[in-house]
Image (cartoon, coloured by chain):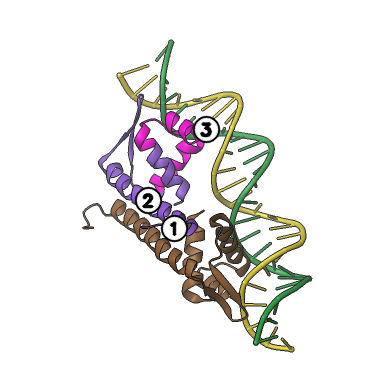
Chain colours: A brown, B purple, C green, D yellow
Amino acid sequence: MSLTQIEYFVAVAEEGHVGRASRRMHVSQPPMSRQIRALEDELGVTLFDRTPRGMVLRDEGRRFLARARRVLEELHEARREARDPAAED
Amino acid sequence: MSLTQIEYFVAVAEEGHVGRASRRMHVSQPPMSRQIRALEDELGVTLFDRTPRGMVLRDEGRRFLARARRVLEELHEARREARDPAAED
DNA sequence: TCAAATTACGGTCGACGTAAGGATC
DNA sequence: GATCCTTACGTCGACCGTAATTTGA
């Protein structure tokens, strides 16, 4: 698992489309599609249902989304504090 | 920043030596040394004092360590829940 | 001079982007 | 047939490990 995979996953979950998410993340569709699948493979869980309209979160995906966001939030705080030690939590 | 860098940083902080940390993480010393430096460069903060005895955490490093651990904890929880949806928080 | 970290360097593995190929309505 | 996602494939950058170098008591 990588931070990139987590960021891509959150983007796809929020956009509902690999295409839109990939534009938002400034990457092309195939890498994003591959990373999502690699993430699912590693977790052993299918996070999205694929439909002709886009990607629909499953329940497992919804639960993972909450966790993924917390990881990214903690990461953001770690970065922020390192750069501005005086800041409050 | 990558999860590898965060894991390496925590290992070095806990061991106090790149050498010991690299053995613990099953990697050789140079990659670990490089990743630590890259992390410091990206953060714009020196996390360790280098001494002939090893790596000594600075205050900035100690603060970042707490944050880094939280990132890894959240990641662990994300993984765990994805694999075992029935588990409690 | 010893023990530790770091830099040099060559090789390999991974991730990207373009292009082609499914699948579903 | 239109609109998605995915697979194929070639290229390039990132990371690793061995070996050599540097640094500090």
Is residue B29 found inside the magenta-colored segment of the image? yes
Between discs 2 and 3, the one toward the N terminus: 3
Q: Is residue D16 above or below residue A48?
A: above
On the image, numbered disc 3 is attached to which residue? B28
Does the CB distance between marks 2 and 1 fall below 8 Å?
A: no
Q: Amino acid at mark 1?
A: Glu
Q: Residues within 10 Å of mark 3 (few under 14, many from 20)?
A: some
Whether A35 is among the magenta residues is no
- Measured along the vertical axis of the image, is residue D18 above or below residue D1? above
Please name the residue shown 46% across and 67% down the image. A10
Q: Which span is picked out in magenta?
A: B12-41
The residue depicted at 37 percent of the width and 50 percent of the height is B73
Q: Kindly state the secondary structure of the residue where label 1 is placed.
A: helix
How crowded pointer 1 is (Cα within 10 Å; few <14, some 14-19, many 20+) is rated as: some
Image location (x, y in percent) of residue B69 = 35, 47
The amino acid type found where label 3 is placed reads: Ser
Which of the pair A13/A43 is nearer the observer? A43
Q: In the structure shown, which secondary structural element does the residue marked by tag 2 occupy?
A: helix
Relative to A15, is B49 on the left or the right?
left
**Image x and y of residue B4, in percent:** 47, 46
Label 2 belongs to which residue? Answer: B73
Q: CA distance from mark 1 to mark 3?
A: 32 Å
Residue that badge 1 annotates: B81
**Mark 2 or mark 1: whose residue is earlier in sequence:** 2
Query: What is the quadrant of residue A38 in the picture?
Result: bottom right
Query: Do callouts 1 and 3 point to residues on the same chain?
Result: yes
Q: How packed is label 2: few (under 14 Cα within 10 Å), some, or many (20 or more)?
A: some
Q: Are marks 1 and 3 in contact (CB under 8 Å)?
A: no
